[in-house]
Amino acid sequence: MINVKILTGYPEMFPGGLAHSLMGKALKENIFKLETINLHDFGIDNRKSVDDEPFGGGPGMILRPDVVEKALLSVSNNINTKSTKIYLTPSGSLLNQKKLGILAKLDEIIILCGRFEGVDQRAIDVLGFEEVSIGDYVLAGGEIAAQVLLEGCIRLIPGVLGHPESLLEESFSNNLLEYPHYTRPKIWEDSLGNKYDVPEVLTSGHHSNIKKWRQDKSVEKTKKIRPDLYSKKEQEQD
């Protein structure tokens, strides 16, 4: 079981999407445990403020390091557990499938969700948070990003997916994007009367041909959409 602890000013945003579908089932079955720590419980003054203006000027507010430290210290931590601390920020290292696989093997993940203009850098450096980004874009805060990271991580835990073998062929598992999928009806007639058939090879029953078709389509799609990813694949083969 992975113990997930979220430091956030908006605990009501959890479990959010993690309460549904396979993630919700895993949560109910205690495959992972989710705990939220409200930063405002450790805020200063009567308003329980957690942020302040940035030194040097500029827009927005910055999450205070003393507030982050108090919230972190409130989290019970067994020194014998495999644990990590993550701060989600657009300026962090880019999250990928390999990183998710590493996280899925941990006992504990502590996630700090920023808001406003960010978090005092001293809190990140001194308290040992790893800065991680889910993509080259900016959200209003780290709560949704935390749910993205956790869904990607938790689905890799044995027992969460109904068909674990699907992990071997999905996008990014081998530096290729996943091949296209088709299902019934075999011939689909759209609202304009146009008819579209499924690729013949997929209904042939010839498993080796199907496997080759899927591999070829993965390569074709990756070259077209993610040439950067395909270059990594070529480097692996050199």
Image (cartoon, rainbow, N blue to C red):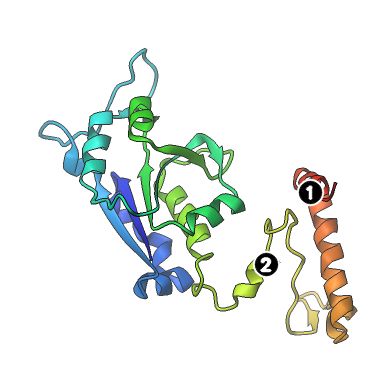
Q: Is residue 235 above or below residue 3?
A: above
Instruction: Say few, some or many: other residues with alpha carbon within 10 Å of mark 1 (under 14 / 14 to 19 / 20 or more).
Output: few
- In what element is the residue under mark 1? helix
Residue 147 figure quarter: bottom left
Residue closest to the eye, 213 or 130: 130
Q: Residue at x 26, y 42 (%)?
A: 72
On the picture, is 159 further left or further right than 114? right
Residue 37 position (above or below residue 50): below
Left or right: 5 with respect to 185? left
Q: Which mark is residue 236?
A: 1
Residue type indicated by callout 2: Leu
Q: Residue 219: horizontal and vertical position, in percent?
A: 83, 57
Q: Which residue is identified by label 2?
A: 168
From this view, report whether residue 74 is shown above or below residue 104: above
Q: Is residue 87 visible?
A: yes
Tell me the quarter of the picture where residue 162 sits.
bottom right
Q: Position of residue 3 (x, y in %)?
A: 34, 59
Query: Measured from the top left, where is residue 175 in percent x and y?
Result: 73, 53
Image quarter hosting the N terminus: bottom left
Mark 1 or mark 2: which comes first in sequence? 2
Residue farthest to the bottom, as pictured: 205
What residue appears at the point 52 percent right and 65 percent down from the top-left corner? Answer: 155
Inspect the image, locate mark 1, and give the three-letter code of the amino acid beneath it: Glu
